[in-house]
Amino acid sequence: MKVVLAFFIGLFVASIPAAADFADFVYVPPAKSATTPLVPAETVEAWLALPTTDTVLNLLGEVDVAAKSAATKPGYQVAAEVPVDLPGEELFAQIIKDGSASVAVARVVSVDALAVRLRVDLAGLADGDALWQVDAATGHAFGPYTAAQDLYWLPVVAGAETLLVLESDAPSVSLAAVSHFYVDPFASDPKGVSCPQSIACEEDETIQDISTATGMIFIPVNGQGTFQCSGTLLNAPDSAALEPYFITAHHCFDGDVDVPGIEVIWDFRPASCGGAIPSTASLPRSRGEAILAENACLDGEFIELDGVPVGARGRAWLGWDSRTPSLSDTATVIHHPAGTSMKISSGPVSALAVTACFDVFCANQGIQQTQLQYEQGITEGGSSGSGALYSNHNYRLFGMLSNGPVHNCNNPPGNIDNFASFYRFYPEVQPWLKPSGTPGVAINCDDGAITCPAKAALGASPALLAGLRTVRDTALSATPSARVWVDAYYAAAPAMAEAVRGSDAARDLFSAVAVPVALAGHWLGGVSH
């Protein structure tokens, strides 16, 4: 039997490309001069001194229904989208004329919200008109927003209220919807808790630099609400520019995503170990530009942002590696667990080619995933999409956090996570990351034979497939030493499947070995023909 499996592994080895594509990280240090606020403080103070039109929304009934529905989904939903459809005449009831300028201020409150986000209709703005949003707690202004944005999600702000400032002669902006956050997306770190470790407490300067590539991403899904995940900027070495390419997990995007409404917040981290978390109002932000590639069964998502600001800590674009990980590799994971500031976890690769369930009924699965066993730290909801970085290969990305059980800092053996395997997803992102690189075969989630050589060769004969499974589950799973060969087969399976599908000779050779094994399985398990 080992001879048979050795043949399979040999077929796999013969199909391995000569070299894998890779890139290393690029780091841009912070600017020496401080950034100038978009709106001078005295202008914001003048706005805040004006009369306001208050809109107080009690959306708790709709939010409760949405929260219960979200609990059954794999993504980390933090807010419910509630339609409001408030016309401009009610939103901005008082327009103040000051000489040639006209200004109206609206205060919008969503009762008991931990954060809010407004979707506004800007189509009625005339040339020269603009809308600004002001964070009620800090006075930080976002904008200006014009008619070019049309139906538009404004930035996420902490707390239950926000202010809108309209520079227009007419109440030409309406409020279409409110995203009511029932989970705090900018939660304070619990005092005295060191697991997972704050990135601010990391002493390695290289890790401090590369951590600036990690962002907290908010994904608005039309009709559902907002999901929060983590993700990573990637370096495209063939390009002279620092492209705004961002990689994360597909399950964060499960639904009708409003791509321009995607928001990434950078540098949410204390300034020092044990220090206070910053206000998110003044942190750098990016918006979604386009979804470039996605794969549901691999759980990979690759998007383009509208730009990437270099913050006070600089900014990194991480490297990546399309080679297959090994059990000797170790990983660093930088993430935003449960809406808290940036954390770091680490541990070795513990399993390869894992198939994992995304839901309790296993109706949706992640395939060919890479598993980590944490020795330091844990992850939580909101960590999804964060990169698994080779600790032993210059922190190149090799996976995106997909799924795992609930973790406990006091039980490290149970703290495992499955990551979408970058080397499987790479054929779909290679045209952007490295156009001069080696093209591969993308995995089609609707094709079960894509990663199973037995299905690729013997798919027309369910009885033979059943015989192979019997051999696997009896003779080959009986001892740990035999199980090693089974694990090796599954690690090699996608490449073998590619060889079998691409070559009649490989298919015939595989079948010549597999059919006798399948017939032996009939004899072992009494499988009927």
Image: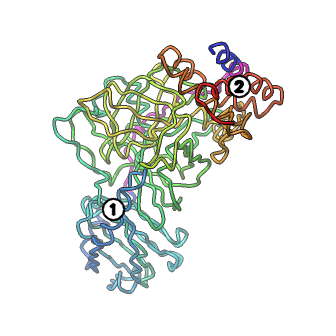
| Whole-percent x, y for residue 395 in the image | 48, 26
Placement of 357 over or under 228, stated as above or below: above
Q: How crowded is mark 2: few (under 14 residues within 10 Å), some or many (20 or more)?
A: many
Dot placed on the residue nearer the N-terminal end, 2 or 1: 1
Q: Which amino acid type is marked by label 2?
A: Ala
The image's mark for residue 100 is none
Look at the picture and state if 153 lies above or below 210: below
Find disc 2 in the rendering and name its residue: 514
Q: How far apart are marks 2 and 1 (CA)?
A: 50 Å
Q: Which of 509 and 463 is in front in this view?
A: 463
The stretch of residues the image draws in magenta is 11-37
Say what secondary structure mark 1 lies in.
helix
Question: Which residue occupies the extreme left position in the image?
Answer: 192
Which marked residue is nearer to the observer: mark 2 or mark 1?
A: 2
Q: Which residue is drawn at 27% across and 78% down?
A: 54
Crowding at label 1, few (<14), some or many (≥20) Cα neighbours within 10 Å?
some
**Which quadrant of the view contains residue 212?**
top left
Magenta span: predominant SS is: loop
Q: Is the residue 201 above or below the residue 288 in the image?
A: above
Q: Residue 258: x percent and y percent?
A: 51, 62
Give the secondary structure at mark 2: helix
Can you tell which quarter of the image residue 139 is in?
A: bottom left
526 horizontally vs 254: left or right: right
Residue 444 part of the magenta segment: no
**Residue tagged 1:** 67
Please provide percent x and percent y for residue 461: 72, 38
Name the image quarter holding the C terminus: top right
Under mark 1, the amino acid is: Ala
Horizontally, residue 312 falls left or right of residue 521, namely left
Name the residue rendered at 51%, 22% in the picture: 477
Give the quadrant of residue 498. Answer: top right
Q: Which of 100 and 87 is in front in this view?
A: 87
